[in-house]
Image: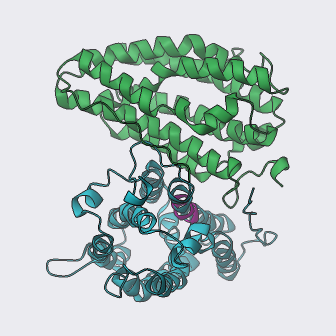
Chain colours: A green, B cyan
């Protein structure tokens, strides 16, 4: 039995300053971000079949298409106009505009290249229930928790550029169905994610003013790493270990 | 690679009557209820370690303690007093009363017998994130979908007595830490679940009056089977296949 030992966070240092909180946030990322997940290593290491990559792209489409819904909820939490204005570009980043491609369009370029039918992808009927539950939990979190925690939950973007860069180089090197056009989503996020993460980090450093609020920020990041990790666990269980739940997508190479 | 082939539902018969809907509901149960899940077979077949049974009981505690929350939301959806009155006993079934044991108390008897600390169980900190996401999805479902679908989502109780009976006899036969007192939760549900399921089935037969409403009832049952199946998938992945996610409970026999 292989056992993923839980990484240990350093003995809790009091969250008595923005710097102490930022250190804790970076520890959480190092211990819990999904670049540590075995499925990520299989994916960028070229060890997945085309069908397994299809399953990943199909499921992650549900995450992609839920992000602007999540961002609209975040915007709705702020009576302060400046914060709404600052957050608004994220809607356009993902949804695009008349004649302008957005992140969801770029994700569909990837699912097209993988030979998945667009109607099937957009219907999201074949995704794993665990994907839907995890992604919906993220949308509910930003609605139900405090506005500070809603912003903090996007801090995983601090760690995203590294994983995007690994995906781009790894997938281009290993899969013949991947080319730079197909990887445009990740290429674009290399510049978008740091800008968004910088804003969110500045925001939580400024607005979390008590140890309790700083702990809530850290817990929001832990929650979000769980949203991402759970999606890869479900893909791994279904498509690497072969336990596809009733009704979910079955790739041709697993039929 | 072992592959759980998705059971095929019979070619869709039009849902033009309550009988046609009930047939479809029973097909869904036969194909998708979690008595078909490999983890269930390992559990009642005596093939799990004490630590794996602990993980199951710890995680399922989160489901148990969320059920009366879910039922309170269901009650809140009805302006019709008779339906609220009919549903109310479920709160007492699970929460008990001053001096009267409820389902949650009986579940804690089981976790006690397994050597789990009550404070740890009740805090729910060690559960799998997938458990929390799936169970919370159930609570959100009964809040966000129609009152008819909220009631329909409990129709898994139609299939529960069989699985409870299997658990009682299988676990009593195979595990030395299990005795009849410990299995009191399931023993009690043998009489409670059929009463509740009969009411829900009569309700949806009477109130789903169009093919669209009958389809919504069937989809609510599918949703609920996914809530249950996803919990066992996550347990199987973490505690049978050894991929415990960061921060979750690690039994002594897996350390």
- x%, y% of residue A77? 35, 29
Residue A250 appears in the figure = yes
In percent of the image, x 48 and y 51: which residue is there?
B130
Q: Is residue B228 magenta?
A: yes
Q: Taking B7 as reference, is A94 above or below it?
A: above
The segment highlighted magenta reads B225-231
Residue A153 appears in the figure = no
Q: Taking A107 as reference, is B235 above or below it?
A: below
- x%, y% of residue A76? 39, 29
Give whichever of B12, B26 is nearer the camera: B26
Q: Is residue A8 magenta?
A: no
Give whichever of A149, B11 is nearer the camera: A149
In percent of the image, x 28 and y 75: which residue is there?
B109
Left/right placement of residue A224 relative to residue B28 reads: left
Residue B80 in which image quadrant: bottom left
In percent of the image, x 66 and y 23: which residue is there?
A167
- x%, y% of residue B25? 64, 75
């Amino acid at each position: 039995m292989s056992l993923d030992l839980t990484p240990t966070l350093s003995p809790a240092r009091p969250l008595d300053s923005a710097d102490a909180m930022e250190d804790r946030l970076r520890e959480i990322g190092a211990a819990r971000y999904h670049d540590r997940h075995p499925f990520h290593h299989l994916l960028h290491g070229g060890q997945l079949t085309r069908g397994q990559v299809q399953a990943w792209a199909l499921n992650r489409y549900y995450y992609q298409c839920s992000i602007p819904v999540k961002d609209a909820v975040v915007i709705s939490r702020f009576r302060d106009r400046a914060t709404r204005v600052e957050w608004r570009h994220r809607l356009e980043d993902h949804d695009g505009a008349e004649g302008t491609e957005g992140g969801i369009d770029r994700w569909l370029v990837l699912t097209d290249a993988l030979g998945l039918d667009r109607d099937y992808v957009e219907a999201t009927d074949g995704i794993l229930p665990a994907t839907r539950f995890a992604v919906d939990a993220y949308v509910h979190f930003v609605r139900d928790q405090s506005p500070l925690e809603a912003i903090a939950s996007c801090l995983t973007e601090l760690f995203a550029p590294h994983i995007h860069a690994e995906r781009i180089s790894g997938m281009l090197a290993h899969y013949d169905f991947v080319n730079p056009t197909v990887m445009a989503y990740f290429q674009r996020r290399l510049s978008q994610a740091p800008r968004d993460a910088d804003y969110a980090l500045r925001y939580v450093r400024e607005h979390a003013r008590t140890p309790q609020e700083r702990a809530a920020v850290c817990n929001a990041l832990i929650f979000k790493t769980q949203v991402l990790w759970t999606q890869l666990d479900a893909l791994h269980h279904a498509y690497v270990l072969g336990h596809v739940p009733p009704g979910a997508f079955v790739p041709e190479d697993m039929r």
